[in-house]
Image: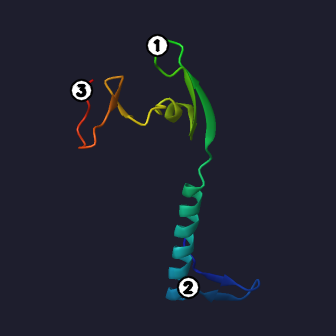
Amino acid sequence: MKLLGYKLDDETFIKASKEEQAEFEKFKKHCKEIREANKIMKIYHIIRTENPEFDTYGSCVVIAENEKEARKIHPSEFVTHIKGNKWMGTAENGEENKD
């Protein structure tokens, strides 16, 4: 979409200046940023149903955009990513924990 000008009435059209076109492009970019920033988040209650063990999390509540993203969130601050379908941690020095 590009701003070409303004239609005042059925017979009068005023061509937009380069400055007006540039302002319109800034406005479009700003609108896009607002749309992207205002993603709808949902609340999910994740419950562990397999291999419950002593001293593990049974459930947690997370906020995510969708179920797929919610399943990637671990309740422990020490678990930082998934590798090979297994939860992994990252040490303070940035190396992966080998637990």
Q: Residues within 10 Å of mark 1 (few under 14, many from 20)?
A: few
Pointer 2 residue: 20
Q: Quadrant of the C terminus?
A: top left
Tell me the SS state at disc 3: loop
Left of 82 or right of it: where is 27?
right
Instruction: Residue at 61% x, 44% y: name it.
Output: 41
Q: Amino acid at mark 3?
A: Lys
Tell me the SS state at disc 1: loop
Pointer 3 residue: 98
Tell me the SS state at disc 2: helix
Instruction: Residue at 46% x, 19% y: name it.
Output: 56
Label pair 2/1, CB-CB below 8 angstroms: no
Q: Position of residue 17 (x, y in %)?
A: 54, 89
The correct choice, above or below, for 77 with respect to 23 in the image is above
Q: Position of residue 62 (x, y in %)?
A: 57, 35
Of pointers 3 and 2, the one earlier in the residue sequence: 2
Looking at the picture, tell me which residue is in the foreground, 51 or 9. Answer: 51
Q: Position of residue 89 (x, y in %)?
A: 33, 32
Of pointers 2 and 1, the one earlier in the residue sequence: 2
Instruction: Residue at 46% x, 18% y: name it.
Output: 55
Pointer 1 residue: 54
Q: CA distance from mark 1 to mark 3?
A: 21 Å
